[in-house]
Amino acid sequence: MVLLCLFLSSCKSTKSTSTGDDNKGQSIETGVASWYGPGFHGKKTANGETFNTNAMTAAHRTLPFNTLLRVENLSNGKSVKVRVNDRGPYAKDRVIDLSKAAARQLDIINDGTARVELFLLNGSKNDLNVENLKKPTYAIQVASLSDRNNAYNKARDFKDGWVKKVVVGRKTVYRVFVGKFTTTSSAETRNSELKTRGIQGFVKQIEN
């Protein structure tokens, strides 16, 4: 009877341990990772933070700032969790730039690059309004309004107008955009046309 109780207790303990596994995330992209740090430490990142080469952060071309990722080195199975706070990489055929601290955990400091897989940890890929993760998309922001109906009415002034709901702090705003462009030059050309009509806007990268 004692042996049976010990056996059942052991099974219960094993089951509890297995259910405590960390979230591995949803696979969204595979490609080459590199790392950056020298010359950038202490400078501003694309989201306005101060870059810290010792923090677990990364640069991605299109993913929203504060996206949490698990980056797995496909050559050795090591992985690291990072937060997107910068734009890049600017080298061709690379999908992510890691801080030196993150690159060290993946053991790619010496080689400089490694083939990796990116896993989304917060949210779902279906929630991302990014048409191509490897290529940025741009739009012209022409207004930011607190009233939803006013924002949609403003968007209807343009054949390619659209609205994005954004929460800034505790405040909800509705940003009105015009168009979707694959290059900044094409977006700036359209913006110049809008200015001739007295419409003041600015070009920005669509994050999500």
Image: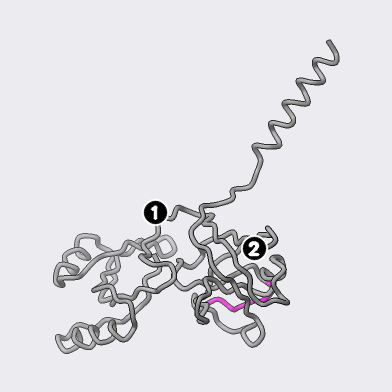
**Which quarter of the figure is the N terminus placed in?**
top right
Q: Which residues are magenta?
A: 48-54
Q: Residue at x 55, y 71 (%)?
A: 96
Classed neighbour count for the residue bearing mark 1: other residues with Cα under 10 Å, few (<14), some (14–19), many (≥20): few
Task: Check disc 2 and give the amino acid type.
Answer: Asn
Colouring method of the image: one colour
Under tag 1, what secondary structure? helix
- Residue 194 relative to residue 37: left or right: left
Residue 77 horizontal side relative to residue 170, left or right: right
* Residue 52 painted magenta: yes
Q: Which mark is residue 73?
A: 2
Number of numbered discs present?
Answer: 2
Q: Is residue 95 above or below residue 147?
A: below
The amino acid type, in three-letter code, at marker 1 is: Asn
Q: Along the horizontal axis of the image, is 9 left or right of 119?
A: right
> Mark 1 = which residue?
126
